[in-house]
């Protein structure tokens, strides 16, 4: 639910959160803003990475049918990107969708590798 709320925050809400984070961030925000790191894509990747890990670790059925996690979360990514065009200050983005997909695949691979390693 937290992830869905974050995906549908209006643009002003996202800016308010960024301002808050910069207020306690230990490094100068000017260095972060001028860096080449696309923070938006990193956040998308991390959120979907976390979702994939939680699906695989939380429900045993998805350990056997991991491809369903890929399918469900890719559909969720497509749906959230499409719906974001209707949220004030937000827009749909193919780059965000690709970041979502990278996070899903990385999360599934890491969770399955962890579970296999733990079994041996």
Image (cartoon, rainbow, N blue to C red):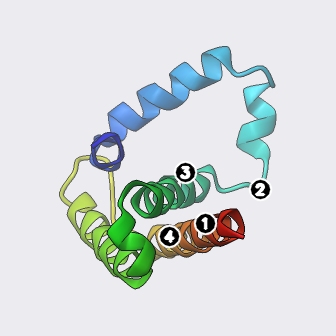
* In-image side of 93 versus 86 (left or right): right
**Image depth: mark 3 or mark 2 in front:** 3
Residue shown at the point (44%, 54%) measured from the top left: 54
Q: Earlier in the sequence, mark 4 or mark 3?
A: 3
Q: Earlier in the sequence, mark 3 or mark 1?
A: 3
- Residue 32's spot in the image, x, y percent? 75, 38
Q: Quadrant of residue 86?
A: bottom left
Q: Earlier in the sequence, mark 3 or mark 2?
A: 2
**Image depth: mark 1 or mark 2 in front:** 1
* In-image side of 78 versus 21 (left or right): left
How far apart in space, not on screen, are marks 2 and 4 (Cα)? Answer: 23 Å
- Residue 116's spot in the image, x, y percent? 65, 72
Residue matched to label 3: 43
Q: Residues within 10 Å of mark 4 (few under 14, many from 20)?
A: many
Residue matched to label 1: 115
Residue shown at the point (56%, 54%) measured from the top left: 46
In the figure, 74 relative to 48: above or below? below
């Amino acid at each position: 639910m937290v992830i869905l709320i974050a995906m549908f925050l209006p643009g002003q809400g996202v800016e308010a959160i960024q301002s808050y984070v910069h207020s306690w961030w230990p490094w100068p925000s000017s260095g972060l803003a001028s860096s080449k790191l696309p923070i938006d894509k990193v956040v998308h990747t991390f959120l979907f990475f976390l979702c994939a890990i939680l699906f695989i670790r939380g429900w045993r059925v998805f350990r056997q049918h991991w491809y369903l996690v890929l399918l469900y979360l890719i559909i969720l990514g497509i749906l959230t990107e499409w719906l974001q065009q209707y949220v004030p200050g937000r827009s749909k983005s193919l780059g965000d969708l690709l970041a979502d997909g990278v996070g899903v695949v990385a999360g599934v691979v890491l969770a399955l590798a962890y579970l296999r390693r733990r079994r041996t």
